[in-house]
Image: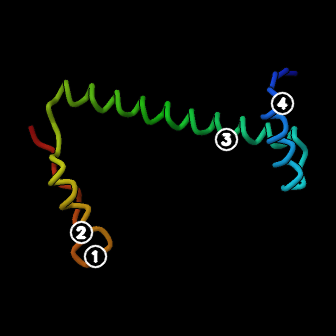
Amino acid sequence: MAVSVKLDDSMRERIQSLAESKQRSPHWIMREAIRNYVEKEEARRRFDDATREALEEYNETGLHLTAEEVFSWMDTWGTDEESEAPPCHT
């Protein structure tokens, strides 16, 4: 798929400068930028989807942990007294 992107002179110069400093082509710089953006946005979408699912589950069951319970549990991580996750409650 061929795609045309219109860039202003300033952006073109910035891309060219980066390309020269990295000894890469401007095309490579733009592909990397697009790949990084797409990966970041896909991760954000997965996070948002998981958040919505967790909220739906909470609304259905009422099961939860308080922040204090989570932080207390996390404080045990990496210690000799590392504990299992506390049970959820209503």
**What's the distance in space between the residues labelled 3 and 4, CA to CA?**
23 Å
**Vertical order, 4 against 42 (above or below):** above
Q: Residues within 10 Å of mark 4 (few under 14, many from 20)?
A: few
- In this rendering, which labeled residue sits more in front, label 1 or label 4? 4
Using residue 8 as the reference point, say whether residue 20 is left or right of it: right
**What's the distance in space between the residues labelled 1 and 4, CA to CA?**
55 Å
Label located before the other in sequence (1 or 3): 3
Which mark, residue 36? 3
Q: Amino acid at mark 3?
A: Asn
User: For the residue labelled by badge 2, is the local secondary structure a helix, a strand or a loop?
Assistant: loop
Disc 4 target residue? 9
Disc 2 target residue? 76
Given residues 40 and 54, the one toward you in this image is 40
Disc 1 target residue? 79
User: For the residue labelled by badge 4, is the local secondary structure a helix, a strand or a loop?
Assistant: helix
Q: Amino acid at mark 1?
A: Thr
Label located before the other in sequence (4 or 2): 4
Regarding residue 1, the answer to whether it shows in the image is no
